[in-house]
Each structure stands twice: as structure tokens, then as C-alpha cells.
Image (cartoon, rainbow, N blue to C red):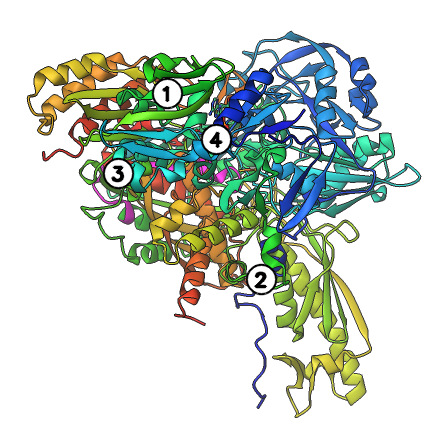
Amino acid sequence: MSTNEFYSLKVNGVDHHVSDAWIGESLLYVLRERLGLPGSKGACEQGECGSCTVFIDGAAVCSCLVMAASAVESEIATVEGLNADGTLTDVQEAFVTEGAVQCGFCTPGLVMAVHHLLDENDSPSELEVKEALSGNICRCTGYGRIFAAVDKVVAVRKGALS
Amino acid sequence: MPVLIAHTISEATEILAENPDATILNGGTDLMVEVNFNHRHPSSVLLLRNVPQLREWSIDSSQQTITIGAGVPYAAMETGAIAAAVPALAQAARTVGSPQIRAAGTMGGNLGTCSPAGDTLPVLSALEATIHLSSQDGERIVPFGEFMVGPKKNSRLQHEIITAVTLPITGRRQGYSKVGVRNAMVISVASACFAVVDDTPRLAMGSVGPTILRAVKAEKFLTEATTNLNIISDEIAREFGQIASTEARPIDDHRSTAQYRAHAIKVLASRLAVRGTAS
Amino acid sequence: MSSVKTKRDVLGTSSLRPDGGAKVKGDFAFTSDLHAENMLWGATLRSPHPHARIISIDTTAAWKIAGVECVVTADDVPGQLTYGLISSDQPVFAKDVVRYMGEPIAAVAADHPETCRRALAAITVVYEVLPVLFDPELAIGDDFEPIHPEGNLIRQQRIVHGDTSVVGDVIVEGHYVIGMQDQAFLGTESALALPDADGQGVEVFVATQWLHEDQKQMAACLNLPTERVRLVLGGVGGAFGAREDISLQVHTALLALRTSRPVKMQYGREESFFGHVHRHPATVWMRHHATNEGKIVKIEARFVFDGGAYASTSAAVLINGVTHTQGPYKCPVAVVDGYAVRTNNPPCGAMRGFGVVQACFAHEGQMDKLAAAVGTDPVSIRLMNAMETGDLLITGQPVESVAPVARLIRETNEIPLPPDLAMDANELELPGGSGITAERKHIKRGIGWGVSIKNIMYSEGFDDYSTARCTLSDGKVVLKFATSEVGQGFVTLAPQIARSVLGVTDAVCDTIDTQIGSAGSTSASRQTWMSGGAVDGACRLVRERLFEVVGAQHNIEPIRFAIEDDEIVDTAGTFRMSVIEASQGITISETFEHHHRPTEELDENGQGNCHVAFAFVAHRAVVDVDPELGLVKVVQIATAQDVGQVLNPLSVLGQIEGGIAQGLGLAVMEEIIVQEGRVRNPSFTDYLLPTALDAPVVVARMIEEYEQQAPLGAKGVGEPPCISVTPAIVAAIRDAIGKDIDRCPVRPQDICL
Ligand SMILES: Cc1cc2nc3c(=O)[nH]c(=O)nc-3n(C[C@H](O)[C@H](O)[C@H](O)COP(=O)(O)OP(=O)(O)OC[C@H]3O[C@@H](n4cnc5c(N)ncnc54)[C@H](O)[C@@H]3O)c2cc1C
Ligand code: FES
Ligand code: FES
């Protein structure tokens, strides 16, 4: 049994210490306001928009619905962890080149969701893509260019395009 | 104000015995919404997510049952062995929220919240599942019908945790349908689970009453109207739906109207009655 | 001949967003991501009642909470007590009376959002609940006590045009209802205010559509000189009209000035639903008179727009509605009455489509009724009546814009229909989706049409200009403007313009703030035209100066120069020099203000040249419907849009697809439900936005016919995509089920009960 009035979180492989936090703080809040990792966005704080998507032990979940202090034993990965070497991932690159970004508020969450999808399924069907992204609301694009970005990554990864 | 993290069921019940006020947390997809919106202020929290036993499931082939841990996320029910054993549960699981919600949310949480719109609950009702509860005093097994006692009310005692759910593997027709106004990520406006168990038809209805309702009159009608539950005429199916809709007790709210909900039950029930039959 | 050059992203190319890299990495700073040393959090206390007298407000207990630094109410507003875009009728804080649920009453600043929440809970307000004016019809006339000193009628406009005694051979009539839509941008309202050291000014980072208008209204309320209220555009997470009005700007600045500390305010989603204006719900009655063949001879109409508690842009929305009664069709005679009224419902104002969405839903419903009445089809009736350049509107204004209405309809009609739903279609392809509510055999397909006309830019005599500065130095261009980038892509377009005009490669945008003249609002599909015109003008002035410099150096008449690719060339000789070389060591900076041609106000009969220009679009929707359950899946939207010139194909496509999704939302799922003044669904759980599984296939054609009036030949493309797609989808539903539906969004019960 462990308790944690002061706790530490492992985010993108790095331990971060949190103190004097209120128990109810969500992981989204702690990442953004306490750990200086504002890449994950919040547009609803009730799991409906997906802007806050992070990976917890490999599962893509809404960080607004994770009690931060409950994630002490987990590996947390955020959008900030995708570019340790400074270059864009293929998914990020495709989002830019295919026009999947407008205001960009949904983008970090969608980039995480697409990475997760393609890690699990390297050649998703059109319907599989739509179902996998159905938890990420984008208000600007109507999704067309987002699907195009996913298609592009799939094609490039298969070597069909360079 | 700690989060207490259990790693075994016995550790969990022990923590709960010592901290009777602790709020149980599993996937957090219900609880954290309430916390974020200031509706709940937990002073201490018991985390079950890290209890491996709660994330297991097992099949008892002699009894033809499956027991699913309360911490198994929906994502794990959508396909694979659980889906093969209880297809209606897989169908219900797939309609819950979004992939992110299904990666975190659990049946334990659905039962803990016990909303009439909870998507697994009609399945548990139709299949007459039993709920396993554990405490320092031992284990208690409660039929679903006695577990859910009202809207967001259940018969779990404060010091008990929900550990698992046992469902029959019927090998017969079963299915779940849910109406929502969007093609994904939507709370049910009306839902229904139809199943053939022990050669009798069962129909449970969600979002149309204070609890999950069993359409007992419709079930009785269908039992009497057919000799073979795999051959159901459209006419009988229609009547079945009609009777079921009279057993619904829906209300008007901002998501829909009572009239539409009753109508939707009629349509869902009659379609489910023939779904998967030869006709 | 010039050698092979590296590709430069000039006008006409799909130049990529300069902020794209930052956005995909999560590095882009939205206003909500900003922090300042020693910062406090602000929060707002709101009325739980739609209409009540405030008997007393007691803030004593809130002041005593540890961590609370400030509590402000109406008594603390140093300047003007009200603000508003057209009429200054909305209180900064309600003082004597609250007129809508969610109206601000007080604000607090504290060390943590949780402390703010406790402080708000500690403020005691005693109310005397008043009768709620929630029926817009009761707001017309004297049936209900005025709920505001300015009365319950915000504006009334009549249009009388032509020989009104005309009667058609065929008459069709309809009553249409349009629900209240929310802009639902993803990045909720947020601002960070930094007080000046002397306490006499403030710098505010804010997500807004119009920095200078905010600045003006804020300065008045804060009683500060305009130049002491400096606004900087914080990253904006979408806008769609909802950021044109003041929301938290004055509150945040006031708290910062009071505490002498930086203050950040940010709305959560629920508060956002109460914190900004919505699309006007409306009822529209129309009666079309036509010849036996179906040619429109007269239209009669009545519009009622529910403006909610405060005026916002209701007056302008009304004018847009009534002046677009005829749609993109010829109409010689009209009698139209329009009302924008005040009620105790949530305030409504700008949203993409601005009044025209409501008009279009009605006139397109009418066109289908007319087609049925004269025994023709939706395409023929529209082609028969299609407007052309030179036609007169019912306001007497000639349409001088390119008006390729018939072409849009034909080109849309040429787009192949989607294949039939397969007999073994996946459940996700059926209405109801993963809910598995239907089988293939339950589904019926329908096809529907919608065509629209939309005014672009501001109307009714408003001098709606934009300012830009171009600075060229060492081959690099820096562009400065106050144009709000809300996601639409002006920061992509502006450098494209500079590259085209000046032959440079390296062109960047400076900080967007109030340190230059106004750019006007990012609304009314106007920034490509207006700010595009300003950037183009500034770049041209710089080019002239550069030609003078080079001409003097090389003894060539500047008039002989032209830019060819990245070089200055002597069109009458052999001289060439790269722009980079020519601009080495010098700095040329020019500012340009672009004004569109003047417009007029309408007279009492609604006559006058009130609009600047128009854009057109056609939509054809294909939907699958489960008639028994009332569920819908939009399969395909085919569209041809009049764009003038395509300046960035990828950006235009993004606007088309995004607008269609919003129009789809209004057609089948999006509605703020208000009962007796109370909002029932202020959350993303119950206010449903289209998801990836709701998005149809979009097949789009961009119709290019150069618009002479427009500085770059390009019309605005932001609003048209979302206007006629809604009636097209609803028409397709009608077609599938063979039943009349006159409201949007269409609810399951409207289809099956
Ligand atoms: C965006 C969104 C969409 C949703 N859509 C749906 C939907 O379509 N259908 C649907 O049915 N639900 C939906 N939900 C609700 C929720 O996801 C489900 O109810 C889920 O099953 C909750 O599981 P959880 O593990 O996350 O529960 P938690 O939030 O962890 O807990 C929920 C409640 O149960 C109690 N509890 C949890 N586990 C136990 C246990 N083992 N023993 C005793 N008590 C326990 C908790 O104390 C709490 O009161 C949605 C939620 C969100 C945020
Ligand atoms: S903020 Fe977490 S899902 Fe919207
Ligand atoms: S780009 Fe704005 S919400 Fe997706």
C-alpha cells in the first residue's frame, strides 16, 4: 500500500515532483499548470473532446479524467515526448503538409490519437480510422484533411510513397 | 488527503475498512467528471486501477459462465474471447463513449455509477448476471436485479468493492442496440438488450426508467407466441416491440422526449427480436 | 531565360501554415497557455436566473478567504458601465437586474482556481425573481414590460420592392424554425492582463476576432486612454463569430488594475456556453409566388430573430437575414418584415453565416416546395431562377459581383453520386453507427439541394478598413497587421502575397497587436479581401520604392521594372537583379490602408446599396435515413463554390470542409436547448458536435471567376460553405422519408413521430 501527499510522476521518461497539490487535480491540470507541459489542451474537462489525450502505460486516455495523484506508478507520455530529438514525427509532418491543422487546438490530442492508432494497426480501413478518431473533436477542419494526413502516413510507412 | 493505491483485492478491502470515507476510483471516467465540475470533493481516494486481479477474466466451461473482473476496460471486451462468450456485452462496450473512454472505463465503474443510461447494464439485466462484492467480511454475490435499486443507486455497501461480474455463456442469440443522436460518442437515449437464455427470451431496456427495466410482459408474449426462438415472424416481432414499449417508463428531458423513447424501444425490441434469425 | 529556381510559396500555391510545426508539437502558445510571474487567477460570478432584480450583493465573506486578492462588482467599474458592438447596452456587471442566465455579477482574483471557486461561492446575492420573457413573439409590440431601458425591440426592418399587387399562378408557403447553434470553438475564452507599473494602463493578451474594437470598448469601461490599453493576440483556438463581442476582456483587465498583478481568466466549457453569444434562433415565414413554370414573381416573408438579453450584432444579423430573403434567385417583387427582439434568453450575435443561414434555410425549403408545386425537380427550379451578375436584389441593389449561380448548380450536379449502400454494409456506415440500431434493409437514401448567396464584408455604410505594414530589408519581408488569426490562415496568406508582389522568399508575420491601425474583424469572410488588400497595397508601395532605388542606381526609369519570379527585370532592356541583392543594406517600410467601396444604409422600405459584394455556393447532400428511428447519416456533400480566385487551394479546401461540418451540425444535431430562459445542455456531453464518424465525404469544386472588385480577385470563402449545406441535408432527409420537416436541427422525433 502506498500513499502520496507529495508525489512524483514519470512523464516522458522523466520524474517530476509534485507537492502541495489538491487531491482532485486532474493530470491535465498538473501537466499544464504544475509541470510546465502545456502541450495537452483542455476544451471540455469531461472526456468529450480528446484534446487532452496522453498515453498512460501505453493506453491513449483523456488526461482530464485521470486523477494526477493516481498515476504515480504509471508511465505517462505526452505530446511533448514525441519530439525528443527536435524533429517532427511522420504523423506531425503529415498533419502540417496535408492541411490537417487550422486553429490547432485539437491537434496535439489528435496527433497522439493517430500515433496510437497506427501503432496498433498499420493499415487501418477508412472506418477504422474514423472510429479510432471519433473521440477527438475538431471544430475547424471537418476532418477531411485529418483523414488525408493519416492516409499519407500509412502510405509512407508502407513505402508506397517517399 | 492521499490517494491510496491497492495492488490486491485484500489490500483494497483492508484500505476501505480503515478509510470508510474513501472514494473508490477505477478508470475515473465518471468520477473525475464530477470532481472537475465541483460536484464531488473526495477527501481520500482508493485506487483500484493497479489491482491486476480486477483486470482478469475467466471462463468456467463446466458452468458455462464467464467471470469478468470489475477493472477490465471496455476496450478489452470489444473483441476477443469476452466478445465471443458474450457478444451483447461486446456490442454494448463498443458504444461506450470514445476509444479514450473505452481504454479507461470499466464495468465496475458502470455498476458503481449505476446510471439508467449505463450501457453494460441492460446486458447484465437481460443475462441475469451476478455481481461479486468483496469486503473484510468476505464475499457477497448479488443478482443484478437486486443490485441496481434506483437511478444512480445500488445496493453496494460502503465498505464493499465490486470485484467481478459473472454472466452465462448462452451460445444463443443475443444483441444490444443503443439509440443516440450522433454516430459515435453519445449517451444513450434508449437502449435494449435481447437475449435467449435457457430457451426463454429476455429483454432489458435502458434509459427509459429509473433503473434498467425488464420487459416481462413482452418476454411472456414471445415465449407463448413462438415455439422456435430462431424463427420469429415480423408480425410477432412488431407485437413484441409494441408490448415492450408499454413497459417502458420514459421521461422528457433535454436529450429526448418520453414519446420518442417509448417509440425507440418499440423499434429496437422488434428489430432485436429478429436480429440474427433466418427470417 | 531564368535558371531553375527553388519553389517559392506564392499566391495560388498550397503554401503551408507557418505555425503548423508549433501546433503539431503542442508548442504553439494559445492564450490559455500563457503564464506570468506572480499571476493571479480570475473567475466570474454569474446569475442563476434568466430574469431577476438584484436586491443585494454581499462580498464580505469572499474578501476574507485566504488567497483572495480582489472582488469586483458593477460599483468598481471606473468608466462606462456598459459595452456592446453596435449599441452599448450590456453591463460589465449586472447591477440592479439580471437579464439572462449566466450574466456576470462579480469577479474575483485569487491565487488558485480552486480559491476562486470558493470565493465565488462565498458571495451572497439576494434576488427577486421576475417573470421571464422567453417568447420572441411577445417581445414585438407592447405585450411584455420592457426588460431593458432600450426596449424589447432591438430593430425592425421592412423591405418593399416592386409592384406588390402581383399575385403568382402558384403560391407556396412555409414556416421555418432554426435552432440556437453554438460556435463551440475548442479553445475556450481566455485572457492574461498585465498592469502597467504606474497603474494607468494595461497590456492584455486575448483570443479575439477584432483587437481594436475590444480595445475601444475596454478603454471606455476602464476609463483609460485607448493607447494605454494595449492588446496582443494570444493564440486563438477557433472563433466562428463568438469572439467578436467582449466576454472576459474588461473583467480580466479590471482585476489586474485593481490588484496591480497579472491576472489570467479562462472559461471552462460550461461557462463558455454562458460567456459568449450564439447563433440567433429564428422563425421565418415565407410565401413564394411563381408562374406556372416556376419563375418567382414575388416573395413575402416575415423574420423574427431572437437576440436574447443584449443587442450585440442583432441589428446587423437582421439586415443580413431580410436582405437575403430571395436567396441566389431573381425576384422582382418582395414584401418582407423583419424583427430582432430582446428576450431573457441567452444573447445572440455573430456566427459564421450571420443571419443568412436562417434566411437560406427558409428560401431553400421554399424552392423545393415550389419545384413540387409546379411539377419540376430541385435542380431545374433553381436553374430557372438563378441570379446573374447585373440582377437587382430586393433592396434595389444591383449584383455587381461575379455571380456564377447556374454554373455552380451545374458543376455540383456533375459530381458523381456516391455508390449505393452495400447490402453487407458495415454498421458504422449505417445511421445509428456502432449502436447497431438498424440493418441495411431499414435504410432509405435521399438527395437534397441548397444554394446560397452571402454578402461579404460589412454593410450599411460602415467604413470597414484594414491596415498593414510591409518592411523589406536585406531580401526579407516582415508584415505587420492587427488581423486576428483564428485558424483561418491569414498568417499563411499574407507572406504568399508578399512573395508574389515582391519576389522574396523570406516573408514572416510580426506580432499581431494594436501597435498598428485596425484590421477590422476576422468575420464576414472579409480578411482575404480586406487585410489581403492591405498587405497587397503595402507590398506594392514597397515595390515602387524599391524600383525607385534600383532605378536611380542603374539609371533606368522605375516604370520599366517588373518583378519576375525573384528578380527585378527591366521590361524594356536586359537588366536583371535579384530582389535579395537589390534590397541589401536598405530598409523600406510602407503602411497601407485598404477600404472597400462605400455602402449605403437602407431606407424605410429596405431599399439601398447596403452590401459590398456577394459570394455564392451550391450544395448537394446525400443522406441515409432510418425512417423508423429517425436517425441520419450524411453520406456525401457535393459542392461547387464561387471563390473568385484560389489563393491557397489547401486553405480553401479546409474552409469548405470545416464549414460543411458546422452546417451538418446545425442540420442534424447541434442545438442549445433553452427552456424559459434556462440553458439545459451547456456541455459537450449534451451539446453534440459532429465527430469523425459523422463527417461525410466532401467532393468540392472551386469555381474561379476573377472578381474585379477584389484586390486579389478572390472572394472570401469562410462563410459560404456552412450556409446552404444545412438546407441541403434537411431536404435530403425530406426526400428520403417523404415528409415535410421545417425545422433544424432535425431531431429523431421530427422524422419518425
Ligand atoms: C466522454 C464520456 C462518455 C461516456 N459515454 C458513456 C457511454 O456511452 N455509456 C456508458 O455507459 N457510460 C459512458 N460514460 C460513463 C463512464 O465511462 C462509464 O460509466 C464507465 O463505466 C465508468 O467506469 P470507470 O472505471 O471509469 O469508473 P470510475 O469513474 O472510476 O468510477 C465510477 C463510480 O463507480 C465507483 N466504482 C468504480 N469502481 C468500483 C468498484 N470496483 N467497486 C465499487 N465502486 C466502484 C466509483 O467510486 C465511482 O462512484 C462516459 C463517460 C465519459 C466521460
Ligand atoms: S479536455 Fe479532456 S477530453 Fe476534453
Ligand atoms: S484545428 Fe481547430 S479544432 Fe481542430
Number of other residues with Cα within 10 Å of mark 1, as a class: few under 14, some 14 to 19, many 20 or more: many
C301 relative to C113 in the view: left or right: left
Q: Position of residue B261 (x, y in %)?
A: 32, 20
Residues marked 3 and 4, same chain: no
Q: Circle 3 is placed at which residue position?
A: B84
Q: Position of residue C738 (x, y in %)?
A: 23, 33
Q: Which mark is residue A88?
A: 2
Q: Main secondary structure of the magenta part?
A: helix
Magenta range: C352-379
Q: Which mark is residue C687?
A: 4
Q: Residue furthest right?
A: C198
Q: Position of residue B68 (x, y in %)?
A: 36, 30
C356 relative to A28 in the view: left or right: left
**In front: label 1 or label 2:** 1
Relative vertical location of residue C95 with respect to residue B233 in this rendering, above or below: above
Number of other residues with Cα within 10 Å of mark 2, as a class: few under 14, some 14 to 19, many 20 or more: some
Give the amino acid type for the residue marked by disc 2 in the picture: Leu
Quadrant hosting residue B21? top right
